[in-house]
Image (cartoon, rainbow, N blue to C red):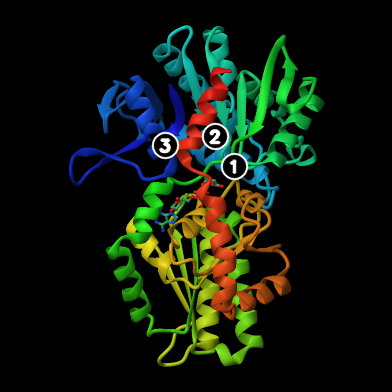
Amino acid sequence: MVAAHRLPVAWDERSGKWKTSPGGLVSALAPVLRENGGVWVGWNGGPGGDTKSFTAAGIRNRPVVLSESEVENHYDGFCTGTIWPLYHDAIRPLEFHRHWWHPHQEVNDRFARAVARAAGPEGKVWVHDYQLQLVPAMVRQRLPGARIGFFLHIPFPPVDIFERLPWRRQVLEGLLGADYLGFQTRRAVLNFAAAAREITGAQGPASALEYDGRLIRAQAVPISVDLAQSKAAGNAPEAKAAAERLRNDLGEPEHVILGVDRLDYSKGIDLRLRAFEVMLQRHPELIGKVSFIQIAVPSREDVGEYQSIRRKVEEMVGRINGRFARASWTPVHYLYRNYSFEDLVGAYLAADVMMITPLRDGMNLVALEYVATRADNRGALILSEFAGAAERLTDALIVNPYDLDALAVALYEAVVMDSVEQTRRMSRLRRTVGRLDVHTWARQNLEAIEG
Ligand code: ADQ
């Protein structure tokens, strides 16, 4: 049984069929569920709908239905307005509302009920991410003999930040209902274990927390990409052609810098643009020779904070272009839309410099995808030290995204990096990423759940 906030399929109006959603989680878990006849419990994505189970893409789906006000209060409210900023270092003002918390509990309870109904008394359950932190204990209550695991895709904050949450104890007790808790980084594990000890009275090290007469294991098992898929996509002639087309459309600049993110304030898109501006100011010889492409996927567009970061980014793009553009050259190309994975890979192959500057990020799969697709061993990666990926990708140019000077210097260093240094770093990065695969990640987690 997998419980994740969203089902692995989404209804496609145009074809009138369920379509598999893209992403590593789905591609890693779909084969496991197909093989074992497992069920995926998740929200169908819209207000209302049907709770009847159905099979799509070879997976048994058990939809959970949310009302419009639950989407507003549980999801846009508690998950996006309270937990997301709290777990990303409180980089935005936090909002705490009881009228968000109560629907959040109800929705978690509905997920737990659906899971308990679909899993046998000795079932194996794997719950995902920050929207469903109360589910492990709620399932445990209904199925005391089940094996329950949880994976947190985003960071877990230090206790000094976490303890502000008025429902800190309930959230921790929810998580401690699991037998095994997986995190992206060692730091997240230590933060969680410290919070559990301080706030719930759990005892012992992260690898053997004692709570409520049970033993719970918390461990870092970082997620990765589908290596075979990424490698194949990087070698596909279509991707190489798309990369050439892109560079051609840009007017064959000497250097292409790329950013790819969901448009989220945690991703540091504004800081990255600022660094680009500073670099152009300090190195006017690069004017006309370097193009910055920022691909931004629309995200949580109904939420005020997301509208304001979008406005901010658009204003910065306008300002930089207004300041530096020539009739024949535009410094920043800003693309606010969804891309197919194939087109995204085309952009990865076209990019001499990949710039990833989150203020805090659970892992950041874009960093791993960039490396996995660069079979030519070329390209330079700038990576924020606050992305989970930085724990392993130590051959990238690692930066503190808050340090504008350092960021502008690293960007310049990456732009002028010679091919020997690019290859030296990239081949080491590729060796690291080559040892990580999302299927291994899924297997390790499932083994840990079995105990
Ligand atoms: P996200 O915050 O969404 O994930 P990330 O890990 O970078 O961030 O994953 C984004 C995924 O979306 C990548 O696989 C990428 O290929 C895809 N994508 C990006 N831009 C796209 C575009 N324009 N069009 C289509 N697809 C695009 C959360 C956490 C991360 C953690 C992951 C997985 O915030 O820290 O790495 O979950 O655990």
User: Which numbered disc, 2 or 1, marks the residue that appears first in the sequence?
Assistant: 2
What SS does tag 3 mark? helix
Asked if the beta carbon under badge 2 is closer than 8 A to the nearest atom of ligand 1, the reply is: yes
User: Which numbered disc, 1 or 3, marks the residue that appears first in the sequence?
Assistant: 3
Which part of the image, by quadrant, shows the C terminus?
A: top right
Alpha-carbon span between mark 2 and mark 1: 7 Å
Alpha-carbon span between mark 3 and mark 2: 16 Å
> Compared to 425, does 132 lie above or below?
above
Asked if the beta carbon under badge 1 is closer than 8 A to the nearest atom of ligand 1, the reply is: yes
Per the image, the residue denoted by label 1 is: 154
What SS does tag 2 mark? loop
Mark 3 residue crowding within 10 angstroms, few (<14) / some (14–19) / many (20+): many
The structure residue drawn at horizontal position 54% and vertical position 29%, both measured from the top left corner, is: 445
Mark 2 residue crowding within 10 angstroms, few (<14) / some (14–19) / many (20+): some
Q: Which amino acid does label 1 sit on?
A: Ile
Horizontal and vertical percent position of residue 389: 60, 51
> Compared to 283, does 419 lie above or below?
above
Per the image, the residue denoted by label 3 is: 28
Q: What residue type is labelled 3?
A: Ala
Per the image, the residue denoted by label 2 is: 129
Would residue 167 be found to the left or right of residue 317 on screen? Answer: right
Q: Which amino acid does label 2 sit on?
A: Asp
